[in-house]
């Protein structure tokens, strides 16, 4: 019993320090809405290794110490049950699908609900897809990654990421396909898709990784609370092909390379088993 109490105190202290670290860095800048001056082609003048030099406001892309994405390696992960379950309260809302040149974004025009993290509400604003995935697990890169971007009332940013590997079709993305075809190769084109229910996005697990990072596109602002769902889901090859063909760039991918973890910790929430 004494050992259990000590472990609980250690976990509690670690979580408190983790939360204070998260709350001490606030991401208030938005990602660049259009791909006008940056590229995902490594080696090109506007490629990821040069983002930090293109504009002074993008300096964090090159010299930031808490950049995203990262490799979620087992050696860095610490199990933190006290992080608690990811509390979601999503609801259907009107949405618009937009071709931003570097990705396809679904922007919510109404109140699509929120997630609750460390006592703060973060409203769901938009979601978009990257292929291949930006985050990796033990060095493995997956075939697609969905980012659900949220903002708090004081403009802090939280992103929920879901990883996918090739397999069965992804139902939510399937609902977007006909609208996606309407904006294929049309930079800045938009299509109203009506009411969209984000509750249809399947997670498949209550386990998640949590760490402090940045936006993965310029200006690479740090202070983003990242939540990556531990379950890897499936998406069809055809769906990923459609996503990449829809954007009007010359790149075969829109994933930023993984960044140095530096001295950051990565938490893993795993629900306690009964009896523990």
Image (cartoon, grey):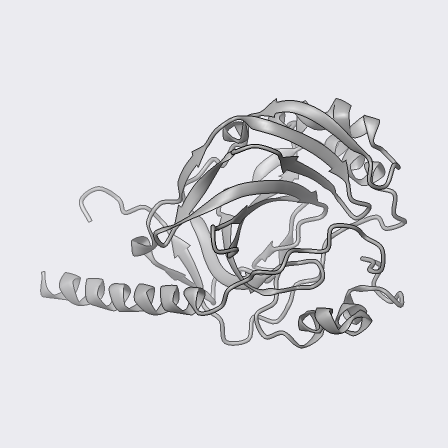
How many numbered tags mark residues here? 0
Q: Is 244 placed above or below 251 here?
A: above
Which quarter of the image is occupied by the N terminus?
Answer: bottom left
Residue at point 62% right, 64% down?
221
**Looking at the picture, how far across and down is residue 60, in whole percent?**
66, 72
- Front residue of 264/63: it is 63
**Looking at the picture, how far across and down is residue 262, in whole percent?**
55, 75
Left of 224 or right of it: where is 55? right
Q: Give the farthest residue toward the left.
A: 1
Res 239 quadrant in image: top right
Residue at point 20% right, 66% down?
9
Residue at point 83% right, 31% down?
183
Q: Is 12 placed above or below 226 here?
A: below
Q: Is residue 240 visible?
A: no
Left of 150 or right of it: where is 104? right
**Looking at the picture, how far across and down is residue 191, in whole percent?**
76, 28
Res 81 quadrant in image: bottom left
Left of 250 or right of it: where is 76? left
Q: Is residue 268 visible?
A: yes
Residue at point 68% right, 42% down?
129
Q: Is 192 placed above or below 234 here?
A: above
- Front residue of 40/137: it is 40
- Front residue of 205/191: it is 191
- Front residue of 13/170: it is 13
């Amino acid at each position: 019993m004494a050992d259990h109490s000590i472990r609980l105190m250690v976990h509690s202290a670690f979580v408190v320090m983790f939360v204070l670290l998260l709350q001490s860095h606030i991401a208030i800048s938005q990602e660049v809405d259009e791909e006008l001056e940056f590229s995902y082609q490594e080696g090109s003048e506007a490629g990821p290794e040069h983002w930090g030099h293109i504009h002074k406001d993008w300096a964090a892309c090159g010299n930031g110490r808490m950049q995203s994405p990262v490799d979620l390696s087992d050696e860095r992960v610490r199990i933190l049950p006290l992080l608690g379950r990811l509390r979601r309260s999503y609801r259907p809302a009107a949405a618009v699908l937009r071709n931003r040149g570097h990705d396809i974004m679904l922007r919510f025009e109404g109140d699509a609900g929120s997630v609750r993290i460390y006592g703060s509400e973060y409203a769901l604003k938009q979601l978009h897809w990257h292929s291949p995935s930006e985050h990796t697990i033990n060095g493995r890169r997956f075939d697609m990654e969905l980012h659900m971007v949220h903002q708090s009332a004081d403009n802090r940013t939280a992103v929920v990421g879901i990883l996918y590997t090739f397999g069965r079709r992804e139902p939510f993305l399937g609902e977007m396909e006909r609208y996606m075809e309407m904006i294929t190769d049309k930079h800045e084109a938009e299509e109203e898709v009506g009411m969209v229910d984000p509750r249809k996005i399947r997670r498949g697990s209550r386990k998640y990784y949590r760490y402090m990072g940045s936006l993965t596109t310029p200006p690479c602002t740090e202070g983003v609370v990242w939540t990556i769902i531990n379950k890897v889901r499936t998406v069809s090859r055809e769906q990923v092909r459609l996503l990449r063909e829809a954007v009007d760039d010359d790149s075969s991918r829109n994933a930023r390379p993984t960044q140095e973890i530096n001295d950051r910790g990565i938490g893993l929430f795993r629900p306690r088993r009964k009896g523990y």
